[in-house]
Amino acid sequence: MVKKLLIAGYPRSGNTWLGYLLSYILNAKYEEFNAPKNSKPTLQKEVLKLIEGKLSHRSRYNSVVKTHERYSFNADKVNLESFDKTILIVRDPRDVAVSLYYYTYSNLPIALAKPENLISKKFWFIKKYLWRKIVYKVAREWPLHTASWRTYEGTKLVKYEYLYQNPTKTLRQICQFLEYSPQSGLLKKALQLFTFKQLSGGRKKGEEYQSGFFRKGVIGDYKNHFDWLDKIIMKHYAYQEMKELNYT
């Protein structure tokens, strides 16, 4: 009996990275639900071959599907009954805001430029407006999205920070949840194949490419961007959910 795995998460939360890892580990085809055409990263053919479900090792899963949709008992967009297991990946919403800002405005040089490189105060105001717009968006949407999936019975919660800091242990726990025993060395091999350096085209973690799908690959980057007002906005809208997930 073949199985399907659903990975849910708010955008820029590590959904794609986790999806690639599990697609390779389970040898299941990686898919994205309702993904915009321009939302997928450009990958080398060698990497794409690893997430098509055509490798030699086997599992009962034939599909790993990523979605950014919010869970709702009344929603008909995602047929949850067709999935055997569901994983929710969450990330500190402050880091999500930073990542989403650069991803959203990657085609606007004025939005990405450092303050000292902006010619006039007018342009600086535009940059600040675009940034705060994203902060408001994430602060309002992230807690609703995350809380909605946490109400779905049987969902496995995975924190991006844990996956980042202790990937082998986290993947082993996920495999236990999926009732799958990976071959010896398979988790290590997956982590070697899908490192930030591999996915970003050769950059090391911390080396920033602002308009890249895989931008920087670090946690806590919000400390370099959030001011006092950003902190107030995030606390006002998202404090309770952040507290529940130990992000305060």
Image (spheres, rainbow, N blue to C red):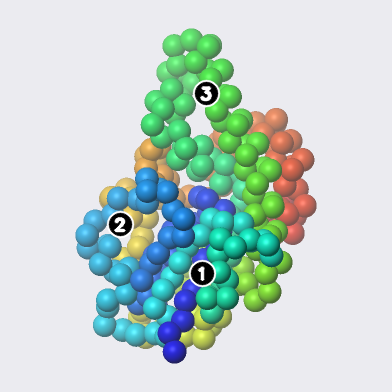
Label 2 Cα neighbours within 10 Å, binned few <14 / some 14-19 / many ≥20? some
Task: Using the rendered image of the protein, determine whether residue 133 is visible from the camera's viewpoint.
Answer: yes
Which residue is tagged 1?
6
Q: Residue furthest left?
A: 45
Q: Name the side, left or right, on which 136 lies relative to 200.
A: right
Residue type beneath disc 1: Leu
What's the distance in space between the residues labelled 2 and 1, CA to CA?
A: 24 Å
State which tag comes first along the sequence, 3 or 2: 3
What's the distance in space between the residues labelled 3 and 2, CA to CA?
A: 31 Å
Which residue is tagged 2?
198
Q: Residue at x 39, y 25 (%)?
A: 109
Secondary structure under the numbered disc 2 in the rendered image = helix
Q: Name the side, left or right, on which 173 lies relative to 72.
A: left
Labelled pair 3, 2 in contact (Cβ < 8 Å) = no
- Quarter of the image holding residue 185? bottom left
- Decide which of 103, 116 is in the foreground and name it: 103
Residue type beneath disc 2: Gln
In the image, which is nearer the foreground, mark 3 or mark 1? 1
Q: Position of residue 45 (x, y in %)?
A: 22, 60
Secondary structure under the numbered disc 1 in the rendered image = strand
- Classify 224 as above or below 143: above
Q: Residue at x 54, y 79 (%)?
A: 84
Q: Residue at x 47, y 76 (%)?
A: 4
Which residue is tagged 3?
127
What's the distance in space between the residues labelled 3 and 1, CA to CA?
A: 36 Å
- Classify 72 as above or below 101: below
Label 3 Cα neighbours within 10 Å, binned few <14 / some 14-19 / many ≥20? many
State which tag comes first along the sequence, 3 or 1: 1
- Quarter of the image holding residue 130? top right
Q: Position of residue 202 (x, y in %)?
A: 28, 50
